[in-house]
């Protein structure tokens, strides 16, 4: 019989013996609670476990579904975020939830009913201007979660002096998000110039043999620089979530 | 004229005016020094800038090249690491550099002439036993750089209780490396159970439609869990470098 | 001369000899009958042979073609199903066939003129809410064919407790359909927690490196759990057909 | 508070109240037990949960690892199976475990210390003779697990009469495994001719644009016949596991 | 000096010597004539050399360009064909060229000012009804070129008796075009049942892992049947061109 | 009731009525005969139906299997061919079958116990010398089947004059096989210069972005010339089979 | 200490010693200047360094962004170019910048306020008429930069005589751009017929297995002709930039 | 009648009229001469037309074939080059051709019987030491053809100061070849820092998601820097051929 089972068995014995309170046992043994809406199961403890509230991926969801999920999550969370939201969806949701906010560049829908504690500094750097929507999704998500964010846009490697120029800014933050499409070389160059952890976000910016971001994705995965982790193509939120996890890693 | 150029111009003016020492200016203006071996340019400042010494990718290098590089780097660094080194290469290099060490599972060659300061705790978790070589490359690299590493092997998601059982261990570290081949689902499950940053390493373990690690790579990039960054297939060192960057991010 | 030919030859001899009725021989020898509409050949015996009536794949078919096929099939079948039908197509067909029904989530058009015998229990489980249309296609097809279906939606692996919570429900059915996009890890986790046969349906839910369902497809094919069979991306009907074949396998 | 937590809480309350035995609670609450060998975690309850004992994927494992795992599993299981085992590995393992058996065509290593109950009939059909190793892996695995297996080899669709000839044999079993490389068309043809569930195994037999089994895999996933589930390329064991799950699905 | 040059040199010598007429030499030496419209170079001798007149690929061409090309080609050819023409393009062209004809299923625009000699019999067979537009493009092109065409539609391999039923029809023609999407298995089955040359046309019919016809294309290239040649996805015209080349191969 | 079934029913009625002989009915109704070796089912009627005897794909077959198959086929066929045969396999088979022949360039093993009737002329043209093994497989297969073959090697498009020089030779045959690796452009150039049907064989000659023949395969499928059909990469036999089907198409 | 650092140090020493002017040092040491618009960083020295002004990739940029960038660049450059500009974008920009010009075929927006010096001759050759937009983008960009351009359109390899006919024209220029979709064979044929450097531009013209230009791209990369460099699919501007770099390479 | 034919016709008329010498006409009209070795057709005029002698791709050629080709080419050329030659092949060829030379790093076999005129300066720059074999193939080929070559190795972008340091060297040459594997970012960085034409050679250096050079290839094709042309993966010779074409473009 292994330790895991012993732990369970002993907990049960302690309860039986009266040497442990049910609430203490419950706290130890319970799996995390959630709420069943029928079409969605909401995880109210996500913020504790994952740093982030349940972020809603809204592509392909109806306005009714988004509104319902936001309402339920808003009852137990200070912050709720919806990604990939069209402006028309925002307007429809706002009729039911007047305090919902929207950023059209980032395509983020969010509720923020209380201020959050500051968790540290991060930077978001893009290779081009077409990468800004993805970068803004990352930056705004991080800000909602409490990070202080430096935005540094349009510093592609074809003008390497622009990159070198911003390195001092990068060295003042704890984590750097690099957003680039086309050949995605910015991740390698930045990775070689800073000792901070680098989160690389390939974007679908480009055409032809960029294959909707595949070229940048492969380049970033093969980066010759150390300390670079990669997230999905156009996944600004995913980069933000990792950055916040890093920042929070030292806050407890 | 932009700030960057102003800074340069003003520095030059200060030197001319005698209000700044050449050495101070030099420190500010120089690019990082390196040494040219002809076939390789060694970067002696890498450790300062990048947390890691110049780690030598040894696949396709001759024993002579590896030995030469190790000798030069060892003169100015406390730690030198070579990755993807065959046992026969190790034996040949050891004749010239007797204090070089080798780990056959991780296929790492390394020199460590001084103890390093502890930088924090990390965990490496694998889905199967066939993933251990990649995991060991990650774990040993982190240890050489000063991290304390928990190794947790063979906890595939097909036996989910094994994963749940080790979550307490994961919550004691600051960063988690997940190493998995086949369908790579462990990254998502671990990512959902811990709030620590997760670095996912797909491995080439599998056959057929694993396409030498592509299936695991794509799965990890599409992880539904938050806070997951991905490195190249079988790139244990790359995961270690990112983990160390994260750990060091709070040490200054 | 092999057995096959012997069988044929002997049957012919028996007819010649008068020891077998033509109708008996005909039943044994005939290939299955079908009807030629010109643009489509309808297979009226499909229900007997394949558990399922000829299910019409309606994408790219005109309203006239769909109506014509439904009319002919309805003359000799109790149930007829059309998949991937737009609401506008349904409305046009309904004018000619007033008793045709439509489910807009599943995009299924169907006729059911008699109740069917119950064939057993199945479950359909999805990782997210965006997977529901594919899941509903599977669930409704199974119900039309006589299965009793448990729908369990939005139990992604990032909240593993949700999955564990529904395992008892899965153990009450004879076959489980898992519907998941993104990294498709749910198939492995469910496959490891139930001993029932698992039919995995990758969906095109996701973006970037999901490559329209390829990531989930590869993950499911490489599942480290045993007892998992995979169907085409978004192929809810295909999963239903396999599930019904399994359920019917023990009904004769 | 949701049902899941209620169940846990109530169980704890019942123990505290003395209205439930610890052993009953333990049985309900424990996760499945396993044993930690350091490099591998063995799951002794797998047979109960999954129909199959823990089957060891031996590619890339050392002889020592295989032997160790077999020894431990053999203490608590009647049957142990190792897949993708080279003949040289078998000979080395046999020195420590004399009653281990080996099938060189299927490349299976197995221990069978007790007879198993019969669970039903299955068929394995191949398109060519080069597909036989994969088919034999499937067939032998099923036999070790208690199935009665009909082997029907070399019935490619280019000679369609061969396929038609064996249909009566297929209709006598409860599940059919189709093994085919090249264009993999046999799955569609068999799927159209039998109402039994069909498990399709693409093989890497072929060259050029077969892309090591990709052509057959895609063909099988796109089968126009109903009731076909697909497993990984060359994954005979995976097909057997699904077939056994189907057969066992009606044994309780 | 090689034969080629000798031939040229000798021709020149014969002209100089007066032993060959300029016109004879010209006929031998000229490359084929064409006409330069600026945006297109029309090849008036194509019909002689290639069996087919210059067939215009109209996707991405303006109505003006199509009309201009048709006008010029019509001056020197009896038949002109445009492929992939939208109905709106046809209507615009018809205003300038009233005798132009259009087939909306095949999306073919064509002029036929004289009857053509019969060149032989061909058959076009499809797996489904959704493959008919591609099949019709092939059939109509062949008819314009003088072939007699049997259309046999909707005979997918999931109902193998339908295929067997039409084999006698296939054996009456000289060349068979098989049009199929999804898994494309019809090419193999037909290829195994007829000794006629088979031209396989994969179509983009399908979804998910059909990858817009890739699955059918790979299947057809890997056909286990002999005597199968493949053309591009959805390339009905290409199949017709090859079939006509085969038919003409014996007419001179 | 359709014609097919009527035909069967009427045949049975005629036998019963005594108006048709069993042997006549048997001839009409039987599927084609074959012989079951256990590991392989030999199709003795293939030559009649398919122009070609059953050609044995020998990759992955044991010497015993090849010998057994050759022996059985040789009893009922004049010609037997094995493709992809290593020289060592040939030597082993020759010990049992002394009159077997071998061509090391084409890697063909064959038996030819009677001369065959001439069926017509074909040409095989290669882009480079590295394509010769595939070309020789095609040429020799065609010769064994009765074709007269012109071999024209190393006429790549980078020296277009070489191609133009051989066009007269191509116009003397009825079908042309073009064998090319790298960018596969020869198929388009030859297709534009001859009106004969062109069978294009991409080869795996090349490196890097040739992706083992994929570049040539795609190029040939997209040929801008008319009348080009494509077979699998390196499939010289497949091209020969199609060419022979074309040649035989006019011999009855 | 390496040469690089010596150079820097010595420069600083010379300034301190008064033996070098600040302006001279500044000129040597400065990185290239640029201007920060917030959403874009404009590089005013690009023309000096790169032959080309900063060319604006306008896909996905707003009319406001394009106008802003054009205004700023126009202040310090004689020529400004925007690529992939829709006609509607042009009209909106023209309201603010009345002297902006637009070419609808090339989809180029440009300002040219001074005549440029002639830099040499180039040719652009296309395989088909559908390739003209990409070719025109290349040709017009080169003309704006000072090149004299010969346009040679619709000379596909299926009519090889057309290609041979234009070779003399190609030999009169210094660099040749070949634009082709489908199988992209024109690059190989032209590369074999001219000794000039050839820049190959694959286009997305085609369908099915052209995979949006992949077939042409791979063909061009595998060209058997020497002296061919490839740019991205549909990247007319990229080809022009390389051609201008070649022409300028000999102008200083 | 077009100009091309007029030219031919007029030439013939002039010969007939005696106003042109046969030799002059012959020179104008002949296609380029070549020699037929049976397995290879040698192009003796290649050096005139293409700058380069016929370079022999030796992979897959026998020692006999290589020797034969070298012998014939050496009779009419001053320089002959064989690429991808193993050392063992060199030793065997050297026995017949004692003055043949070999470079084991570049794997080049070559004959150089006369000195060549200098054609200009080029540079070859690599990202890593593992890229040196490909770079050396390019450098040595260029030197044999008359170029003066600067070799600059191991200047990866992760140490951007190394790249900046060598820019002055790059500005002294007329064309730059960039050789890089992994993420291939060096091409973009160099392309942004020099105005010279850049030829990018992706290498297969890397592992996992480098997919044997695909990542670097895609990155280079998507380079955000202007003036970059790409050749096949590992194709050092191809880059050299393009560079020499560029250098020669201004020599006549």
Image (spheres, coloured by chain):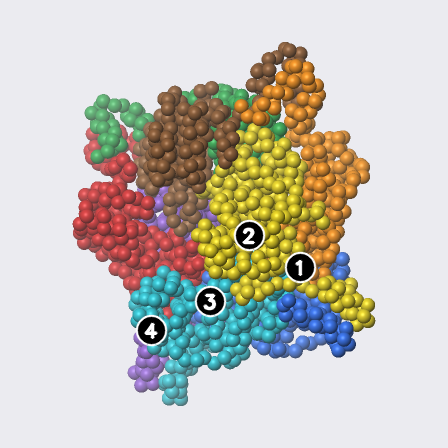
Chain colours: A cyan, B blue, C red, D purple, E brown, F green, G yellow, H orange
Q: Marks 1 and 2: which is nearer the front?
A: 2
Q: Does G33 sit above or below residue E63? A: below
Q: Marks 3 and 4: which is nearer the front?
A: 4
In the rendered structure, find residue A137 and report the number of the disc placed on it: 3
In the rendered structure, find residue H156 and report the number of the disc placed on it: 1
Q: Marks 4 and 1: which is nearer the front?
A: 4
Residue most extreme to the bottom: A19
Q: Position of residue F152 (x, y in %)?
A: 60, 27
In the rendered structure, find residue G111 and report the number of the disc placed on it: 2
Q: Secondary structure at mark 4?
A: loop
The residue at 48%/67% (across/down) is: A136
Q: Residues within 10 Å of mark 4 (few under 14, many from 20)?
A: few
Which residue lies under the disc numbered 4? A98
Residue most extreme to the top: E19
The residue at 44%/32% (across/down) is: E69
Q: Residues within 10 Å of mark 3 (few under 14, many from 20)?
A: many
Left or right? Give the position of D227 relative to F192.
left
Chain ID, mark 3 = A
């Amino acid at each position: 019989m292994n330790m895991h089972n012993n732990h369970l068995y002993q907990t049960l014995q302690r309860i039986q013996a009266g040497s442990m309170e049910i609430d203490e046992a419950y706290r130890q043994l319970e799996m995390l609670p959630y709420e069943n809406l029928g079409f969605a199961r909401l995880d109210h403890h996500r913020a504790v476990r994952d740093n982030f509230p349940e972020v809603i991926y809204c592509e392909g969801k109806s306005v009714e579904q988004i509104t319902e999920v936001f309402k339920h999550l808003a009852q137990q969370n200070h912050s709720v975020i919806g990604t990939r939201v069209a402006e028309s969806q925002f307007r429809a949701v706002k009729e039911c939830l007047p305090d919902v906010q929207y950023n059209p560049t980032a395509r983020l829908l969010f509720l923020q009913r209380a201020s959050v504690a500051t968790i540290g500094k991060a930077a978001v750097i893009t290779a081009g201007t077409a990468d800004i929507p993805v970068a803004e999704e990352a930056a705004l998500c991080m800000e909602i979660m409490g990070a202080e964010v430096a935005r540094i846009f349009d510093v592609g490697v074809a003008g390497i002096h622009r990159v070198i120029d911003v390195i001092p800014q990068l060295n003042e933050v704890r984590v750097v998000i690099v957003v680039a499409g086309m050949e995605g070389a910015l991740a390698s160059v930045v990775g070689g110039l800073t000792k901070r952890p680098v989160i690389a976000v390939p974007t679908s910016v480009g055409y032809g043999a960029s294959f909707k971001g595949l070229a940048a994705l492969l380049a970033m995965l093969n980066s010759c620089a150390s300390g670079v982790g990669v997230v999905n193509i156009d996944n600004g939120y995913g980069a933000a979530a990792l950055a916040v996890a890093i920042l929070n890693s030292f806050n407890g």
